[in-house]
Image: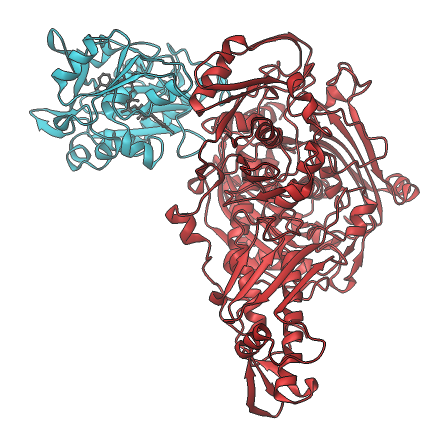
């Protein structure tokens, strides 16, 4: 059976349905981890390192221990015996990767400001805060390593026990001679240096957790604001030595993650071992100002990007070298983040020669890890900025240079030089649609008019075309990249006696609307109302198998698993129906939630009746077990490759340097769309996050390694007030990788948008001779670029 | 981000509030709390007692009194923004109020709190300075009036005594032309630099965030009254200011913005 084989059934897939999640979220009915009332829970507060790099000389906890309400004050030494293993990094990208042991509490040295040093447990939050303030830690300050280009020289070391700041060097060099030749023979070359600044994920809900030991001992329920309840359970078991069977992880309502909750955190481990030690529930909720230091950061790369091209603008080779900031330690997938972009630095272009090298470097800053797009926004930024530079060098329109280089629609499935197989796409059509929607020619004319008139409100138009790989991932491919887990997803579809349907998914939604979308997939297939489908998730006792939610994987992998499980349930129901109706299976068709005899539609048996039969089991065919249920674990054969064209129109105020995003046009191809309203929501948020990188956000450090903008008053997350209404369109090339033909859309907006915006800023100033603008394009930065360019003329 | 512990008392009248303040040197008035509570959470302020004046009923009003408009200290930013009387008589205040922070700040913060806080980066103080407003304070020894030019003393320091309450702000009518240039990166943010310009019989210009206190752009005002053009006056706008550098702007850039924004504000006045 495929998606198209029930033409008479009403389609639910493709409908704009309101999200069933929203009433509970908007009314405040939903419970987040910090809302959970757990009688007797103790409060954990951490004393954190104020220094980026220092030796711990002495901890004096005596005063703190005698303060009111204090239950325990523990150092790294005190807790060392609790650990079966250091904190996990699941992605050792090379066999010789350096990974300094990282424990939840520092023992001898601290390696970033914000690292946990002392755990204070008290009966109330405020008592714990006050006691933490009374802990005295003496440090000897050491030189911090803060800048990537300094780090790579090894002039000083982020980790005193290592002989280099490099954790690993990873390269992908499929055809080095071809690359050499292309650069030798190139009519034009481009050589650029781009900086991916550090970003703070800033999910709306801070991290929060509570660990509840069972009263009789033995097992633990871990409630955590996490994207990965399943992975977390495995890692908690491996790190604390508690058998996995004694651990239940629940992610209650989770208020966003963007990758920051795709991790195993010191505080989660501490709450668990403290609950074990103290035999009482222990909870932790981070404050915003500590979360900005202690929750992972994103991006943090210096990119050296080179293109070789012919005189007619055809790109012949891409060569890229990266320095990637790991931060102080390797968190769950830190080293793998640049690898997720490693295959994509040639973007949507048909290029035969390719070379990629990445050096992962330790610095004395907050660890980095996957952040919305993880690796792909960086890759897209580099190629899309470089394509604009090439266009400028050849005095060619940025749209035209892209047209000349696109992978042609008829080449799909397209085997890329980097070794991927791009599933489907129509890149020319994306660009054409976006240009048309933007009124590109008119915009260019307006830009010329303003230039000619000397208008200080300069217009800039930026184009960015992207392709990304998501739907993580074929487990065998992950194995070849040394990733420590698989990429399958699990699903159970269960039709209950009263014919209501329970769906159990291994995905862990935290804002994406899986309950709505998964119910639509099942309802569409079964011919029932989505309201009769309940989706259960994010509790390892209810959904024991799963690989969780990140990397735009949930629909293409988890949604497919659900689709296939639904198919299996129908197959089983068909057997029962044929038996009951005394006809051959081949003579039945499933339409409108009933099995009916082909050609005589009034002879039919509704699914509801079969569900009840499966429950009573009074009259089942031989060899068919009771109950109407199927479980599946699906491992995708390939990634999926969403793609699109984004166009940003900015106005740059020449007198102040202020950049105003005036219009934003996006044409995205995420394959078939289950619920276009959810797709649009994801694209809106995604674009906003990319615009944020381009114009607003950056984790700023001073020379001693202190984060300067740790509060949301200073770390500028943009709001709707800063943004225009997005103009969205789409193309649809169904992915052949899965039966739903879907690709994923959680990160696409973020991947396409930052280069579109910066290309627009540079375009606005190009006639002055400006060729680059670092991110974020702050008013002062843009103003000084204008000043420098004007002075140079 | 947890304040140290403190006592909390709620006053039902100005007199009662003054008595409470007099009883404890380290007590502080709590109005909307949108400046004070952030400071307490950072433990930059640790008052022993908060005297909550938020429920005193007769301190929120906007009324015409002769050639002035009297604004009660507890009037919320949102009420200043939407007051028809102000829109008509002192429109610059409505305009400024509408751009303070975000809607939740505007519904809770009070004009008295913003003024008593005396932040050089805040919007109302500079506007009141440009308007030549008068602050009315009540303390143990009675009621007194303080001119805006005498009110803002230093960094977060005003002419109010610790046991005085700002009860009313009186602003002159007659400044019919006005312009507000607030330069910030997000709509909800404080000004990186802001300029308030008002014109009646004369033109007054106030600066936001060009020094530790709100400032009058004296160099600009002098040039204008000597007959200088907008461009000429704007070119010296940053004279006599002392902006500081922070993560949003360098000193030089602030000075530059001051010149650009004054030019824009004056041009807007027409
Ligand atoms: C997120 C955010 C954004 C903001 N953005 C801006 C902005 O863009 N522009 C801007 O100007 N402001 C901004 N503010 C500050 C806001 O306007 C505050 O409301 C205002 O500054 C203080 O008013 P309040 O009533 O909250 O005073 P409170 O915080 O209650 O008090 C402030 C100080 O004044 C004293 N005080 C208060 N009332 C009196 C009185 N009647 N007599 C004597 N002393 C008194 C208090 O003791 C305290 O020292 C922002 C605040 C926040 C939280």
Front one among A32 and A278:
A278
Quarter in which the C terminus of chain A is drawn: top right
Residue A162 % position (x, y): 80, 19
Q: Residue at x 62, y 85 (%)?
A: A580
Seen as rendered, the residue at the extreme right is A177
User: Residue A632: which quarter of the image?
Assistant: bottom right
Seen as rendered, the residue at the extreme left is B66
Residue B9 % position (x, y): 22, 19
Seen as rendered, the residue at the extreme front is A216
User: Residue A194: which quarter of the image?
Assistant: top right
Front one among A278 and A644:
A278
Can residue A502 be seen from the camera position used here?
A: yes
Q: Residue at x 22, y 32 (%)?
A: B80
Q: Ligand 1 shows up in which quadrant of the image?
A: top left
**Chain with colour cyan in the figure:** B
Front one among A452 and A584:
A584
Q: From this view, report whether residue A69 is shown above or below residue A393.
A: above
User: Residue A182: which quarter of the image?
Assistant: top right
Could you tell whether B15 is left or right of A648 in the image?
Answer: left
Could you tell whether A37 is left or right of A376 in the image?
Answer: left
Front one among B7 and A98:
B7
Seen as rendered, the residue at the extreme bottom is A600
Residue A181 % position (x, y): 91, 42
Could you tell whether A416 is left or right of A295 in the image?
Answer: right
Q: From this view, report whether residue B159 is shown above or below residue A790.
A: above
Chain A tint in image: red
Residue A215 % position (x, y): 53, 37
């Amino acid at each position: 059976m495929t998606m198209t084989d029930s033409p008479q059934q009403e389609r639910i897939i493709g409908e704009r349905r309101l999200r069933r999640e929203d009433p509970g979220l908007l009314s405040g009915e939903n419970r987040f981890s910090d809302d959970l009332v757990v009688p007797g829970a103790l409060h954990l507060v951490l004393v954190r390192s104020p220094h980026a790099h220092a030796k711990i000389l002495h901890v004096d906890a005596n005063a703190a221990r005698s303060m009111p309400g204090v239950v325990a004050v523990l150092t790294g030494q005190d807790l060392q015996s609790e650990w079966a293993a250091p904190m996990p990094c699941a992605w050792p990208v090379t066999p010789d990767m350096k990974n300094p042991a990282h424990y939840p509490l520092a023992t001898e040295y601290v390696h970033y400001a914000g690292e946990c040093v002392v755990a204070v447990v008290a009966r109330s939050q405020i008592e714990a805060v006050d006691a933490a303030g009374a802990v005295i830690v003496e440090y000897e300050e050491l030189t911090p390593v803060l800048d990537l280009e300094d780090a790579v020289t090894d002039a000083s070391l982020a980790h005193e026990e290592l002989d280099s700041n490099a954790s690993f060097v990873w390269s992908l060099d499929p055809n080095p001679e071809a690359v050499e030749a292309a650069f030798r023979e190139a009519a034009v070359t481009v050589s650029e240096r781009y900086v991916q600044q550090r970003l703070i994920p800033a999910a709306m809900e801070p991290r929060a957790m509570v660990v509840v030991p069972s009263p009789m001992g033995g097992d633990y329920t871990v409630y955590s604001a996490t994207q990965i309840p399943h992975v977390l359970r495995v890692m908690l078991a491996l790190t604390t030595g508690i058998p996995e069977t004694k651990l239940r992880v629940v992610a209650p309502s989770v208020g966003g993650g963007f990758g920051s909750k795709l991790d195993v955190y010191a505080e989660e481990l501490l709450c668990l071992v403290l609950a074990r030690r103290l035999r009482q529930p222990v909870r932790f909720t981070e404050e915003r100002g500590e979360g900005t230091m202690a929750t992972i950061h994103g991006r943090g790369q210096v990119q050296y990007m080179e293109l070789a091209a012919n005189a007619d603008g055809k790109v012949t080779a891409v060569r890229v070298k990266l320095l990637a900031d790991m931060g102080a330690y390797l968190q769950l997938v830190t080293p793998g983040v640049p690898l997720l972009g490693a295959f994509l630095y040639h973007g949507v272009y048909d290029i035969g020669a390719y070379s990629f090298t990445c050096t992962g470097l330790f610095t004395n800053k907050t660890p980095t890890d996957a952040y919305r797009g993880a690796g792909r926004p960086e890759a897209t930024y580099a190629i899309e900025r470089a394509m604009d530079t090439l266009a400028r060098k050849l005095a060619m329109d940025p749209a035209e240079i892209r047209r000349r280089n696109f992978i042609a629609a008829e080449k799909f499935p397209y085997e890329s030089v980097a070794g991927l197989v791009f599933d489907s796409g129509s890149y020319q059509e994306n660009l054409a649609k976006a240009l048309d929607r933007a009124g590109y020619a008119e915009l260019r004319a307006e830009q010329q008019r303003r230039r000619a008139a000397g208008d200080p409100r300069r217009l800039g138009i930026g184009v960015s075309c992207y392709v990304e790989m998501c739907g993580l991932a074929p487990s065998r491919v992950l194995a070849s990249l040394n990733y420590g887990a698989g990429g399958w997803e699990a699903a159970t579809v269960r039709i209950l006696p009263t014919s209501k349907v329970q769906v159990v998914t291994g995905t862990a939604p935290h804002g994406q609307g899986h309950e709505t979308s998964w119910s639509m997939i099942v309802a569409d297939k079964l011919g029932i109302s989505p309201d009769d489908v309940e989706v259960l998730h994010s509790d390892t006792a209810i959904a024991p198998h799963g690989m969780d939610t990140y990397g735009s994987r949930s629909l293409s992998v988890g949604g497919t698993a659900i689709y296939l499980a639904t198919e299996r349930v129908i197959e089983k129901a068909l057997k029962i129906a044929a038996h009951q109706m005394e006809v051959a299976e081949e003579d039945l068709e499933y339409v409108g939630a009933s099995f009916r005899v082909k050609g005589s539609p009034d002879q039919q048996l509704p699914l509801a009746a079969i569900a009840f039969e499966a429950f009573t089991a009074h009259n089942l065919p031989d060899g068919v077990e009771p109950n109407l249920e199927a479980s599946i674990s699906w491992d995708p054969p390939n990634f999926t490759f969403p793609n699109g064209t984004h166009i940003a129109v900015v106005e740059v105020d020449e007198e102040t340097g202020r950049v105003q995003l005036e219009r934003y046009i996006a044409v995205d191809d995420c394959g078939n769309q289950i619920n276009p309203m959810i797709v649009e929501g994801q694209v809106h948020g995604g674009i906003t996050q990319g615009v944020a990188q381009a114009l607003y956000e950056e984790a700023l450090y001073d020379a001693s390694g202190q984060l300067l903008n740790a509060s949301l008053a200073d770390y500028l997350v943009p709001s709707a007030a800063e943004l225009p209404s997005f103009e969205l369109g789409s193309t649809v090339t169904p992915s052949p990788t899965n039966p739903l033909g879907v690709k994923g859309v959680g990160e696409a907006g973020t991947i396409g948008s930052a280069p579109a915006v910066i290309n627009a800023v540079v375009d606005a100033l190009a006639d002055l001779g400006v060729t680059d603008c670092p991110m974020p394009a702050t008013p002062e930065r843009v103003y000084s670029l204008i000043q420098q360019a004007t002075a140079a003329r | 981000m947890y304040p140290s512990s403190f006592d909390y008392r709620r006053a039902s009248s100005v007199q009662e509030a003054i008595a409470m303040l007099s009883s404890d040197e380290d007590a502080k008035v709590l109005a909307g709390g949108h400046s004070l509570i952030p400071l307490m959470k950072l433990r930059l302020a640790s008052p022993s007692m908060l005297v909550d004046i938020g429920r005193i009923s007769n301190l929120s009003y906007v009324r015409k009194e002769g050639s002035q408009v009297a604004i009660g200290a507890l009037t919320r930013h949102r009420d200043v923004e939407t007051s028809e009387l102000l829109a008509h008589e002192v429109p610059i205040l409505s305009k400024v109020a509408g751009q303070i922070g975000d809607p939740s700040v505007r519904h809770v913060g009070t004009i008295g709190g913003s003024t008593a806080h005396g932040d050089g980066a805040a919007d109302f103080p500079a506007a009141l300075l440009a308007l030549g407003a008068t602050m009315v304070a009540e303390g143990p020894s009675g009621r007194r009036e303080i001119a805006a030019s005498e009110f803002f003393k230093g960094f977060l320091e005003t002419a109010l005594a610790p046991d005085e309450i700002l009860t009313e702000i009186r602003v002159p009518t007659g400044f019919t032309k006005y312009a507000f240039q607030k330069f910030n990166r997000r709509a909800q943010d404080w000004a990186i630099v802001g300029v308030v310009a008002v014109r009646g019989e004369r033109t007054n210009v106030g600066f936001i965030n060009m020094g530790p206190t709100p400032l009058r752009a004296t160099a600009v005002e002098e040039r204008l009254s000597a007959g200088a053009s907008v461009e000429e006056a704007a070119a010296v706008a940053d004279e006599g200011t002392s902006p500081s550098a922070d993560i949003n702007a360098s000193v030089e850039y602030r000075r530059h913005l001051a010149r650009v924004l004054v030019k824009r504000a004056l041009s807007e006045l027409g």
